[in-house]
Amino acid sequence: MRKRLSFLLFVLLVVSMIFAGCSKGDQEKTLQNNNPPAAEQEEKDAADLQPEEEIDYVLFLKHKDKPYILDEAYSVKKSDERLKGISIEEFVVRELIGFEDFQAYVNPIPKGTKLLSIEKENQKVVVNLSKEFADGQKGISNDTLLSIGSIVNSLTVLEGIEEVEILVEGKPVKKLNGIDMTHPFGYMEGLYPDK
């Protein structure tokens, strides 16, 4: 009788260990299924560590004391709120118009100028500015050339842009302070100091 009881207890113990082992294995499988495989998790962690993509651009700004423009490089994150719903071309012109004088750099665009519209046609950008752009072109024609050059060069250094046409209040301008405006402008050389 004692042997039987011992045998039954032994069998019960073995059976309970088998069931306990199975349920623990099922739990581990369930936990493993809830976690992504290690390789996927590592890829996700690596993606989180990569820096956010940025767009590089250049503003061409007038020197405060000398008759030339200087280039100043900037970058903006692709997720920046200022880029929402607008093209990089529009962003660059808005940044140029809104530039606040800093050290040797001054804004070459006459105060009060507004960007009315901007359109990209293949490799040409048509910039439509308010009348303040034309009205503010006082002084010598070189100042006007620098003002035009700052817009043209800031845009033509962007990828895929070869020419810039400037309109005032939606209309072509023949001459602006002695500068011929009847054609689109390509990148303008010769507006920089000799190095």
Image (cartoon, rainbow, N blue to C red):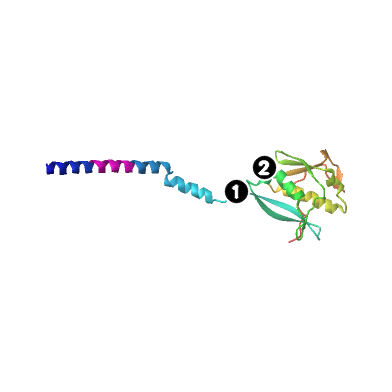
What amino acid is at disc 1?
Glu
In depth, the one of 44 and 144 nearer the eye is 44
Up-down relation of residue 32 to residue 191 (above or below): above
Q: Quadrant of residue 83?
A: top right
In this view, the mark in front (2 or 1): 2
Residue drawn where x is 32% and y is 41% of the image = 23
> Of the residues under marks 2 and 1, which one precedes in the sequence?
1
Residue carrying label 1: 53
Q: Is residue 99 above or below residue 17?
A: below
- Which of 25 and 97 lies nearest the eye of the viewer? 25
Q: Nearer the viewer, residue 38 or 69?
A: 38
SS class, disc 2: loop
Q: Residue at x 50, y 50 (%)?
A: 46
* Residue at the extreme front: 1
Q: What crowding class fits label 1: few (fewer than 14 Cα within 10 Å), some (14-19), or many (20 or more)?
A: few
User: Disc 2 versus disc 1: distance between alpha carbons?
Assistant: 15 Å
Which quadrant is home to the C terminus? bottom right
On the question of residue 187 being in view, the answer is no
Residue 169 at what x, y percent from top left?
83, 40
Question: Horizontal and vertical percent for residue 52?
Answer: 58, 49
